Amino acid sequence: MKDMDDIPALMAGIGQRAKAASQALATASAERKHAALIGAADAVWADRQNIIKANAHDLEYGRDKGLSDAMMDRLMLNEDRMRGIVDGLRAVAEQPDPVGEVVAEWDMPSGLHIRRIRTPLGVIGVIYESRPNVTADAGALCLKSGNAVILRGGSESFHSSTAIHACLVRGLRQAGLPEDAVQLVPTRDRAAVSRLLSMTDTVDVIVPRGGKGLVGLVQREARVPVFAHLEGIVHIYLDKDADPKKALDVVLNAKTRRTGICGAAECLLVHQDIVQGLGSDVIAALIAAGVEVRASGDLAQVEGTVSASDGDWGREYLDAIIAAKPVADIDAAIAHIRRYGSSHTDCIVTEDPAAAERFFQHLDSAILMHNASTQFADGGEFGMGAEIGIATGKMHARGPVGAAQLTSFKYLVQGNGTVRG
Amino acid sequence: MKDMDDIPALMAGIGQRAKAASQALATASAERKHAALIGAADAVWADRQNIIKANAHDLEYGRDKGLSDAMMDRLMLNEDRMRGIVDGLRAVAEQPDPVGEVVAEWDMPSGLHIRRIRTPLGVIGVIYESRPNVTADAGALCLKSGNAVILRGGSESFHSSTAIHACLVRGLRQAGLPEDAVQLVPTRDRAAVSRLLSMTDTVDVIVPRGGKGLVGLVQREARVPVFAHLEGIVHIYLDKDADPKKALDVVLNAKTRRTGICGAAECLLVHQDIVQGLGSDVIAALIAAGVEVRASGDLAQVEGTVSASDGDWGREYLDAIIAAKPVADIDAAIAHIRRYGSSHTDCIVTEDPAAAERFFQHLDSAILMHNASTQFADGGEFGMGAEIGIATGKMHARGPVGAAQLTSFKYLVQGNGTVRG
């Protein structure tokens, strides 16, 4: 197809159509957006066998490409996961509509009445990797928040994403909303990503979800504002005053519940005073649970550990592997996390409130946890219904990004012939 | 001086010192920041004669450069304006400290207690033009919000800004805070601006305040996130149901109270049904007040108007000039503003609530006003104490930017050995 070869023209057209759709969407009623999402959920469920068939092509492509087991797992769709996607679409549909919400309202001595209300951002570009469910989640959240979206999935999930996208479009059409409100870039050509990053005239914000390669590309090339979604290099620090049962529960859950999600723990820091006792017990429990523990210092003496190398600090495994290191005290733990962390989610296990407070104050990760599993780093677990991802930047959105964080705001000011003195 | 010639090295040093200072500032107590601001206010007041003397050099430079009367007025400092600067510093000092404020707090069924608290952004770069008071306002707001700041004033205000900056540093020193928390780029070389825009390692956000030249430079070159401050191409639409007295009051105040501020009206749109009556009266009143009215269509028949050209639509005069145009109806007014406005502040004068609601819903300016002077577009008039400017972008900050909008946030999550099922 000639169109697919001329990437600049292809992308410019997608951008212009998205911008036009965003204007209709910005004033679309809550009911209509709800109907579109319910329609999409119904379409996905009705079409699930076809989507799973499309996914089989992607799995074959992934196998040929030699994807890791963790990546193949992220890519795979089955009836259970299809139900998850449908439930996700329905959950977003049933959330309150953020557009027009009065966030704050006050009167001034001048006589002005000021309201601050939520508005859509406009057009959102979402660049993601292998997980096909992001097509549904991101599409739904952007629609809910009144934004048009341009989806650019990973080449591995191309067929699955295309099949899911068709269902979203069916929902839009049934609800009488512009089909261009949710577009999927119809080519695997990587040049389309570079193009998307530079479309300042038509795209208001880019949400990149992916690993180092994507992040580097975005940092080099993005001209459009970005909600950075870096890796989840998640640390847990076991303080000397950690409760043993809480430590065991939290670390095991944080590492092993699901290893492929960004809230999975990747590095364990152990106060030197408890290396011999609790620290070693936790590591033994991780090994017993099938985790490869790459340990340094005295922790390397625990039976079954592997020796850590420099490359293990600040590494996101997304697999049944964890790095482990003794630290002199809480400040050494904080310094390690500042150096190697990714400002995603970090956790302290302690019974000492002063230590928890110090950890909360001196670190600036999007999510800081005390005595809780880092696998709670998730929009649903924060009460947001769903999330487009976990933002690690400091601009606009941060932490789990739900529909409300995909909005901007404006001030509506009411006077009565009011003038300034 | 050798240092001043090596702009990359100069700016890299400034950035590194700012980043180091920002870490001390992020955990500085509210009392200490308050003391630094009061100290700075005292220093500015004690030093006012020297600052006014420095300003005389700038005025001479401006005169030689042939600056317009409006620009010379923005540049000029006298005892009265020095008092304004001091009052501004004190006002910011007395505001509540935003850092650590709990913005939201809730419990989840999982047992987690979640708090969302304000944190500083880090290092803010402020690029501005001729107004020397911005040195004090921007420095104070960044300090209040726990951010280090790199100030880059216009070459016209170089001496005034340098003298004011020295007073801010004195306040920091007296309060025991790092002097590098507020730095002023010590050269007029424009290459320093380009450099600042690309310092992603040390600068978290750029706040550009200025005209088209600066905006274009920022759009082309910024690698750091930007709080866009475009021009204030402020429109007032006189609806067919406008109240005559309110219309006269609002338009005259919006145009003539101060012509050089960004909230000053630049374009008047008049519903065609009232061109002969109220519209002509308002224009006659503007002319009587000394305003040049560049009119089109039937409005050009009002005695004393000048003929508008295409270049008058979407133009920011910042002077005693206004463009004026008849429109067929409210939708034509909205279409004109969408095309030529700058998303800063736009106003409707009407007694028809449905028209006001339509204007509010179908425009997406940062500030929309109904029956109120656009000169209220100001942080102080919004109850924010002071402002670093009026942001016209949609990311993070929008409208008047006070200390609270110069913060980010993080989530603090409290569990009790809580794990995810």
Image: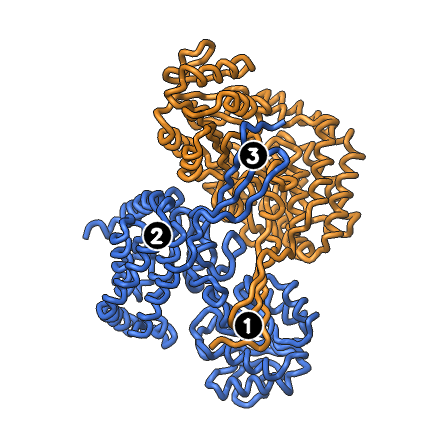
Chain colours: A blue, B orange
Q: Are marks 1 and 2 in contact (CB under 8 Å)?
A: no
Residue B340 on image: x %, y %: 41, 31
Q: Nearer the viewer, mark 2 or mark 3?
A: 2
Q: How much space separates mark 1 and mark 2, taking CA atoms?
A: 33 Å
Q: Position of residue A275 (x, y in %)?
A: 64, 83
Tell me which residue sits at (55%, 78%) in the image: A250
Q: Mark 2 and mark 3 in contact? Answer it, CB < 8 Å.
A: no
Relative to residue A60, is residue B375 depicted above or below? above
Tell me which residue sits at (46%, 26%) in the image. B315
Query: Along the horizontal axis of the image, is B303 left or right of B96?
Result: left
Q: Is residue B280 left or right of residue B57?
A: left
In the picture of the structure, the residue carrying the numbered disc 2 is A31
Residue with the mark numbered 1: B111
> Which is nearer the eye, A415 or A299?
A415
Host chain of mark 1:
B
For numbered disc 1, what is the local secondary structure?
loop
Pointer 1 and pointer 2 on the same chain = no
Name the quadrant containing residue B381: top right
Query: What's under tag 3, amino acid-wise?
Result: Ala
Residue farthest toward the bottom in the current orientation of the protein: A303
Determine crowd level at label 3: few under 14, some 14-19, many 20+ residues with C-alpha closer than 10 A: many
| Marks 3 and 1 belong to one chain | yes
Kind of residue indicated by mark 1:
Gly
Chain where mark 3 sits: B
Residue at the extreme top of the image, as rendered: B303
Checking the image for residue B31, the label placed there is none
Residue A357 as seen in the image, left or right of residue A324: right
